[in-house]
Image: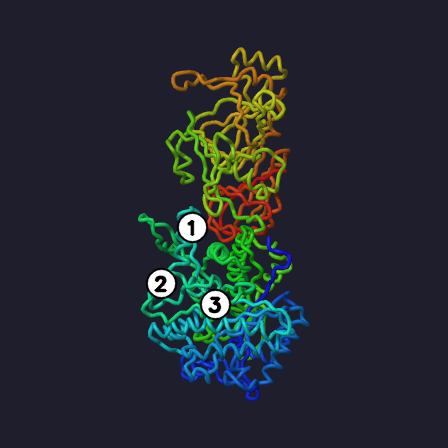
Amino acid sequence: MFRDDFVWGVASSAYQVEGRDPEDGCGKNIWDTFAEEGRILDGKDAYTACDHMHRYKEDYKLMKLLGIKAYRFSMSWARILPEGTGKVNEKAIAMYRDMILSMKENGIEPYITMYHWEFPQALQDKGGWLNEDVIQWFGEYAKVVAENFSDICEYFITLNEPECFVGLGHLSGVHAPGLKLPYKDVFKIAHNALRAHGQAVINLRKYASRPIKVGYAPTCGMAYPATDSPEDIEAARKTLFGFHQPMDNWTWNVAWFNDPVFLGKYPEEGLKKFAEYLPEITDEDMKLISQPLDFMGQNIYNGYMMRQGEDGEPEYVDREAGAAKTAAGWPVTPECFYYGVKFLYERYHLPLYITENGMSCHDDVSLDGRVHDPNRQNFLDLYISALQRANDDGADVRGYFLWTFLDNFEWDKGYTERFGIVYVDFKTQKRIVKDSAFWYQKIIESNGRELTVNKKTRPILFLNPVFKEMIWGGNQLAEKFGYEIPSDKTGECWAVSAHPNGDCTVREGEYAGRKLSELFKEEPELFGNLPLDRFPLLIKIIDAKADLSIQVHPDDAYAKVHENGSLGKTECWYILDCPEDATLVVGHNAGSREELKEMIDQKRWSELIREVPVKKGDFIQINPGTVHAIKGGLMILETQQNSDITYRVYDYDRLSNGKPRELHVQQSIDVITVPAPSAEDSVSHAADLPANTMNELIACDYYKVYKLTVTEPVSFEQEHPFLIMSVIEGEGLVNGQMIRKGDHFILPSGFGKVELQGDMTLIASSVK
């Protein structure tokens, strides 16, 4: 779990939300120029954006209502120092101080980012980051920030994502100032930015009115392993801190922008690879760059998968076709949050904040006036759960800042990407809280305990059947249910079984391949934490091409003593198919135990055995001690205790491998109930029960069984410890997943709302 003082916040940048006012005294920055040049998608600009500069008091009240505890925001360098240096814009100082005080009034801790790409145009005209004077320019700006805000703010971040503003702004040119400079110039810009960071750290501490905490917020895609093998993990780690990027994308490098700051040196691999492009790098430079910091920030959105190749070197692994992406086309890779944070902490050993993480969705206002964004909730849950795992495994994670609070101006993409947890109508500036904001509120209130990582997920458990060949078996399991059976002597499909003689495995999902018996023991929450030593039920489909033996089952007390602690066997049958004149053996005609023994000894089977007529849709309860047998031509669904104890009384003198099959005469005589219950009490007719309702067929000490025929949408709450469902006819949907005849699945404890639709019939069962 996260520490008790874990910081839950949201993040933004000044230019993306503030907007402008003719009287605000703000200086022009490089993004203003970029917009004027028509280089923003759809010709948009940020002169209004979210109009946060006029609406921040209401925005902070909204943050408070949603439980936000911290706000990482940037100050605009060009707003505070319109010319980049020199005269201070006192209107900006007053606005930012009032912002911070308003945050605090609403219980929100401010985290100031000094530079989130709002570079003054006046300084750009003097060479911008390529001019070495930028180190002192940025230092002067840091002095102003410390003098004016350190009394009311404790946390400061110098640079946001130098990889972006260096690379996208000066190498590819897709961001302001939109330059495509030679490699040599871009390396100098990167070096100057890191030196400026160091000077800012010095001046923040020097001019602060009290002790403050200072950090730095780089970014990058995070490498993660294809498997948890040591080889793949090492391949991912090596790649993350390596230099695999092509030169036209070299700035997307973790080590180059982190090692100098946190370790005091550029990585050797990079120094060799980039040698021909590098500026002079002095010891004084490295001392300046590596000023001690209190924490590291990291902006993480996605990652890439790595494994060790056959040659022992790392190789990239493609994601599967159709893998999840955000509306921005970025891959959804929560694994990168675990491994990225883990790798970063192991290398740099500083307290770590996730200073940005979130996703762009195709958000719109629904007919109910709400903004429903389940994709964002799922994304955040997966990522923050992975962050907790990294924290639990030893990384010192101090906080998480969700990007972002308000939908805003998304740089060169204008207003086409919505990252916010609050929807903004950019025409009216109306705010609408999205579902994800309410979800995040619950996460904050619980300090992460409501994350799925701290809950047992409750997926539908689809099972792979186990098939049994029998002397009396046939091929109807293939012909009528489409199963791939081992032979035309297949008599039983153990559809839901955790018995040692036939243990089903989960077909798909996070528990795929795990045996039901194992799942019951190791994930008891899925089954209502039942105080049992084994999964209690067994569901079979039986195809009787020929008559089964005349048999009987013991009760629990007898089986415990005589069958090595096994359960007894209570069972019931639902007749799936049968001939028109079908019968079943249910009960016997002996009046006393002495007469029973005599009839068995004398093989007076026709006198002893009682047959009753049955038809499709009939339901029969077989209690322990009941003589019974399925006749040839019948197919039934059997629900029973998880036991395979059967005593054969008579087997029609059939041979198996040339020998009569074993009988259990004495055990049978011991356990048969005498006299037998009446035939009328044994069979009930369940073919024509009402549709679209759960019709109870039986409730005994060991199970409840229901029949449900679906002809229109049906929904109910799954309130049993677990609910087994078998589709015996037709097809349809369960919570959006296709199901058809022959499918068997378990709805686990706490599953919640079950939604069924289609044209199908199901038999459901659970424990009482």
Q: Is the C-beta separation of discs 2 and 1 under 8 Å? A: no
Secondary-structure class at tag 1: helix
Q: Quadrant of the C terminus?
A: top right
Q: Residue furthest front?
A: 283
Query: Observer-nearest residue: 41 or 613?
Result: 41
Q: Is residue 98 above or below residue 593?
A: below
Q: Which residue is mark 1?
A: 233
Secondary-structure class at tag 3: helix
N-terminal of the pair, mark 3 or mark 1, is: 1
Judged by depth in the image, the label closer to the viewer, 3 or 1, is: 3
Report x, y in % for residue 497: 51, 35
Q: How many marks?
A: 3
The label shown at residue 245 is 2
Q: Is residue 552 something one can see in this rendering?
A: yes
Query: Observer-nearest residue: 533 or 230?
Result: 230
N-terminal of the pair, mark 2 or mark 3, is: 2
- Left or right: residue 305 versus residue 668 is left
Residue at 60% x, 85% y is 90
Report x, y in % for residue 574: 53, 35
Q: Which residue is mark 3?
A: 287
Q: What is the C-alpha distance between the residues marked 2 and 1?
A: 19 Å
Query: Observer-nearest residue: 314 or 573?
Result: 314
**Which of the 4 image quadrants contains residue 706?**
top right
Judged by depth in the image, the label closer to the viewer, 2 or 3, is: 3
N-terminal of the pair, mark 2 or mark 1, is: 1
Q: Is residue 426 something one can see in this rendering?
A: no
- Left or right: residue 19 versus residue 486 is right
Amino acid of disc 3: Lys
Report x, y in % for residue 336: 46, 57
Residue at 42% x, 25% y is 471
